[in-house]
Amino acid sequence: MLTEFGTVWGVEASPLALEAARRRVGTSAHVSLGTLRGLGLEPEPMFDVITLFDVLEHLDEPVSALSELRARLAPGGRLLVTVPAFQFLWSVHDEQNQHRLRYDLRTLTTQLSQAGLTVDFWSYYNTLLFPAVAAVRLARRVFPGNPTQPELEASQGIANGLLTRLFSAERHVVTRRSIPFGMSLLAMTRAR
């Protein structure tokens, strides 16, 4: 989708995920193996927009990584970040995905500010399922069951289509105003 606006670069830390990404985008985007430290891009380009979708929660030093990305922003550039929300929703899903933290607005904006970024817009999202997911996760603390059982198996067919429509319906609200709760959190920032 982003290729209509310019050249797109992607960085993937996993060789397996890198191969999947290359199959998916073909030659429309440049995807390379690397991490937030040493992006693997030569020469090191400056970017008008950097997206960081569900990455910060995996990092031991998120402020350092954000600072490095801020340094890669062109003048007037933007950084869009998404993270899972609310530590009280911590579950086996987070452990299986090697998360370090689930974020709230204060924690995310503090880290962004420490990295020299100003938040221009924020919103929680994945709001429609929030009550049900929160109830299930909190109930599992009282009635643990099998602690290694995944919460959701891969959705297929009708369920996948329904979930896709639910999640995409929020785009009409999130683009106009901040939502005060949800399963995830996003922030649009710029360098100070």
Image (cartoon, rainbow, N blue to C red):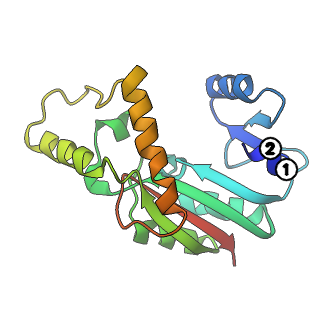
Does the rendering let one see residue 148? yes
Q: Are marks 1 and 2 in contact (CB under 8 Å)?
A: yes
Instruction: List x then y, in percent, for residue 71.
Output: 75, 65
Left or right: 131, with 111 as reference point: left
Instruction: List x then y, in percent, for residue 159.
Output: 36, 27
Q: In the depicted view, which residue is nearer to us: 62 or 1?
A: 1
Sort mark 1 into few (<14), some (14-19) or many (20+) by Cα contacts within 10 Å: few
Residue 6's label in the rendered image is: 1
Q: Is residue 7 above or below residue 76?
A: above
Residue visible at 57% across and 75% down in the picture:
113
Circle 1 SS class: loop
Q: Is residue 92 above or below residue 87?
A: above
Residue visible at 66% across and 23% down in the picture:
20
Quadrant of the image for the N terminus?
A: top right
The residue to which callout 2 is attached is 3
Cα distance, mark 1 to mark 2? 5 Å
Quadrant of the image for the C terminus?
A: bottom right
Left or right: 16, with 58 as reference point: right
**Residue farthest along the left direction in this orientation:** 142
Instruction: List x then y, in percent, for residue 63.
Output: 57, 63
- Write down the quadrant of residue 14 in the picture: top right
Q: Is residue 192 above or below residue 172?
A: below
Does the rendering let one see residue 154? no
- The amino acid on which the numbered mark 1 sits, given as a three-letter code, is Gly
Residue visible at 56% across and 69% down in the picture:
112
**Residue farthest along the bottom direction in this orientation:** 192
